[in-house]
């Protein structure tokens, strides 16, 4: 894949700052590991051997390049513009998460470490990490909020089948942010032989840069595919944003293309006005979480707020620092998509195109349904379909009333009796 | 009024280490924590660290997490933390706030430093702030004459130790091991090595924290460090006690035991 000539790829600065965001606000005990990781990553990136090993895994194992599919019947619901999907749902393990994990797992071996640990929310990143660990012969421990192990029991079983140890985290709000805290706690004690395979473009430097670099293959592929399939660049690239890795992955190659709008769709939950949401950029303020300066959902005293979303993968109170920067510079726009809007879009794609999306990705599809009519019939939209919906059949089945009795069919509710 | 510096000077003159005790503000209640801190002061702690409860304490083990979680559920605010500091300082014992950085950032670094100084506080211990990101805090610390206490870890390179000690004030906090807060059976030889590495870069006192649970360990650490920091073991006394009064007695007993420990360490040589 050819590298773009623009120098946006040069961001962040050497200390990991994207404008005023990013950096390293992390314990001193991790600083040498972060320095070591930065050096190892930069050396690997410059090493043709590493690059070709990763490229071989991506093509021969993960199934890259993923397709771009035009979805005309879905597009008819979006005001009649043209809509294309970047099919990360077709990648091995069912989402874009595998791109990042293969890169970090290879790097783990290169650093001579024998164990990888990860946090997971929906379980997709945990499954991808357990997969790469099995493939490369690494020990693997995945931390998952106790609340999420309950919501995503199938993914817990998948990780265990792959040989990973899954640790339910029972502290704090028992969701993704607490799983991240617990993974950091593990890492502080085991850093000598353990790599923290972080799941999104977040955390202290070099993670936001490195994860973005491993995910940018999405946009590099899609840009070429769009030129071939549509004969021109899209007017907008739309992606869901939890931590922001699939969005950074598809946005990055398009940043120099000023005619291309970059649209991030955050989890609006019950609606921003209710306070029950996870729309960080839309509803948050500048502060620090998980080792980075970014935008987060916090109260007046800097305590992290509880979030809510039907989508476990978007249920996170922070966002990667590069998104905070793209927002502040105006290069990307962020909007909130409610649970209801996302599930409408989820259903629409199932029924018009025969593709069951991940609920996370359905937030991006909802963005397309909103944006299409505004941009007109000549418009071309590229949506990142970050994952497939197999993991969500239980939640969606309950939402739409296909599963469970009606008394128990509260959206996002538990499995029935 | 006692400051961190004079506490170390006094201890050095007595050929012993200082005892630094930690308690989070707001646990079991704001006033309950104040009373506990005053008991600690009375029973022989030389310096007291007041923890500012935070929702994401990623350097803390289960015991302190639990206490801090309860403090937050109880509605503890920054103003309560400052009130706790004021009470400790008022009792003539140097008081520092130990805080993750976001609450200070949110409050405004300068305003926080101003209000801490007004409450009689001596400085801040910042477990997730390193010198690279500490510019505004170092400026405020120097303006309000507060001690910026940073941590060094066994994994810190000599270059990093040089950087950290060059901006530190009051003392240097040496983490005895790689890990989170919590008691350990052994406070290893790693700590002694780290302390001597730190001494090559600074004449500031060096205090050792993480893991210390009893008088014997305190004595052992006091044989090579200028200060012994104890947190989890105190919090555990409050958490495990049948009632609050028993918890306070536990704090009093442990403080006395540790205070004896920091006094016996040097004679042991
Ligand atoms: C399919 C899918 N999309 C998106 C996300 C959100 O993560 P990110 O914003 O880093 O892409 C997840 C996370 O679990 C996911 O599983």
Image: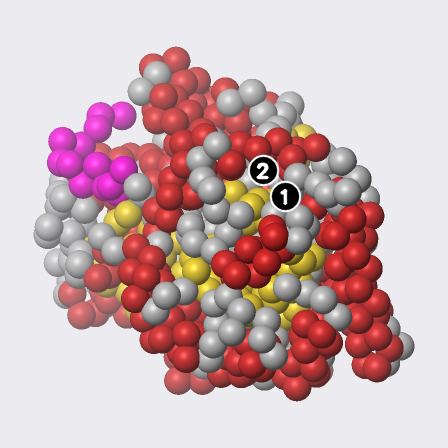
Q: Which residues are magenta?
A: A1-14
Residue at which label 1 appears: B225
Which quadrant of the figure contains the C terminus of chain B? top right
Element type at marker 1?
loop
Residue B44 appears in the picture as rendered: yes
Residue B63: image quadrant is bottom right
Chain where mark 2 sits: B
Query: CB of residue at label 1: within 8 Å of ligand 1?
Result: no
Residue A370: image quadrant is bottom left
Identify the residue shown where x is 62% and y is 31%. Answer: B193
Residue at which label 2 appears: B195
Q: Position of residue A175 (x, y in %)?
A: 60, 62
- Observer-nearest residue: A123 or A79? A123
Alpha carbon of mark 2 to alpha carbon of mark 1: how far?
7 Å
Task: Verify whether residue A7 appears in magenta.
Answer: yes
Q: Residue furthest right?
A: B242
């Amino acid at each position: 894949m050819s590298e773009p000539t623009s120098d946006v790829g040069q961001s962040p600065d050497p200390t990991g700052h994207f404008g005023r965001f990013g950096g390293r606000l992390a314990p001193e005990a991790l600083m040498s590991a972060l320095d070591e990781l930065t050096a190892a990553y930069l050396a690997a990136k410059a090493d043709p051997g590493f690059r070709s090993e990763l490229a071989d895994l991506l093509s021969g194992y993960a199934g890259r390049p993923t397709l771009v599919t035009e979805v005309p019947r879905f597009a008819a619901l979006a005001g009649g513009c043209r809509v294309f999907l970047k099919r990360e749902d077709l990648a091995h393990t069912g989402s874009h998460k595998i791109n990042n994990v293969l890169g970090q797992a290879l790097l783990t071996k290169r650093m001579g470490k024998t164990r990888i640990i990860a946090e997971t929310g929906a379980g997709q990143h945990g499954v991808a990490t357990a997969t790469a660990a099995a493939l490369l012969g690494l020990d693997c421990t995945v931390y998952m909020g106790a609340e999420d192990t309950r919501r995503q029991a199938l993914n817990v079983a998948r990780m265990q089948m792959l040989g990973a140890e899954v640790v339910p985290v029972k502290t704090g709000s028992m969701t993704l942010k607490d799983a991240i805290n617990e993974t950091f706690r593990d890492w502080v004690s085991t850093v000598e032989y353990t790599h923290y395979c972080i799941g999104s473009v977040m955390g202290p430097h070099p993670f936001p840069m490195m994860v973005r670099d491993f995910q940018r293959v999405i946009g590099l592929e899609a840009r070429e595919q769009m030129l071939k399939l549509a004969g021109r660049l899209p007017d907008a690239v739309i992606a869901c944003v939890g931590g922001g890795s699939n969005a950074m992955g598809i946005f990055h190659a398009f940043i120099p293309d000023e005619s291309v709008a970059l649209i991030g769709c955050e989890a609006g939950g019950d609606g921003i006005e209710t306070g029950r949401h996870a729309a960080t950029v839309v509803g948050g303020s500048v502060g620090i979480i998980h080792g980075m300066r970014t935008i987060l959902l916090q109260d007046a005293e800097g305590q992290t707020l509880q979030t809510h979303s039907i989508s476990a993968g978007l249920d996170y109170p922070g966002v990667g620092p590069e998104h905070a920067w793209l927002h502040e510079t105006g290069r990307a726009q962020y909007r909130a998509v409610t649970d209801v809007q996302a599930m409408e879009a989820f259903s629409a794609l199932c029924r018009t195109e025969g593709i069951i999306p991940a609920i996370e990705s359905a937030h991006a599809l909802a963005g397309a349904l909103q944006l299409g009519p505004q941009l007109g019939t000549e418009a071309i939209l590229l949506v990142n379909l970050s994952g497939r919906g197999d993991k969500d059949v239980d939640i969606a089945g309950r939402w739409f009333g296909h599963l469970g009795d009606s008394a128990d069919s509260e959206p996002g509710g538990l499995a029935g009796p | 009024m006692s400051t961190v510096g004079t506490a170390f000077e006094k201890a050095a003159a007595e050929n012993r280490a200082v005892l630094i005790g930690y308690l989070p503000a707001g646990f079991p209640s704001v006033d309950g924590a104040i009373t506990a801190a005053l008991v600690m002061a009375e029973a022989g702690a030389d310096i007291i660290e007041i923890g500012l409860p935070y929702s994401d304490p990623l350097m803390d083990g289960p015991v302190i997490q639990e206490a801090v979680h309860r403090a937050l559920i109880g509605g503890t605010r920054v103003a309560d933390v400052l009130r706790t500091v004021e009470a400790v300082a008022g009792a003539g014992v140097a008081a520092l706030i130990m805080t993750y950085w976001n609450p200070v950032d949110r409050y405004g670094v300068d305003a926080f430093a101003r209000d801490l100084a007004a409450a009689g506080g001596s400085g801040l211990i910042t477990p997730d702030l390193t010198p690279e990101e500490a510019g505004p805090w170092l400026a405020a610390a120097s303006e309000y004459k507060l001690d910026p206490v940073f941590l060094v870890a066994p994994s810190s390179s000599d270059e990093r130790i040089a950087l950290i000690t060059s901006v530190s004030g009051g003392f240097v906090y040496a983490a005895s091991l790689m890990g989170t807060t919590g008691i350990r059976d052994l406070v290893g030889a790693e700590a002694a090595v780290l302390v001597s590495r730190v001494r090559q870069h600074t004449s500031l006192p060096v205090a050792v924290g993480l893991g210390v649970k009893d008088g014997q360990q305190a004595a052992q650490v006091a044989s090579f460090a200028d200060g012994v920091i104890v947190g989890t073991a105190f919090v555990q006394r409050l958490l495990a006690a049948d009632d609050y009064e028993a918890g306070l007695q536990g704090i009093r007993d442990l403080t006395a035991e540790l205070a004896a420990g920091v006094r016996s360490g040097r004679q042991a040589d």
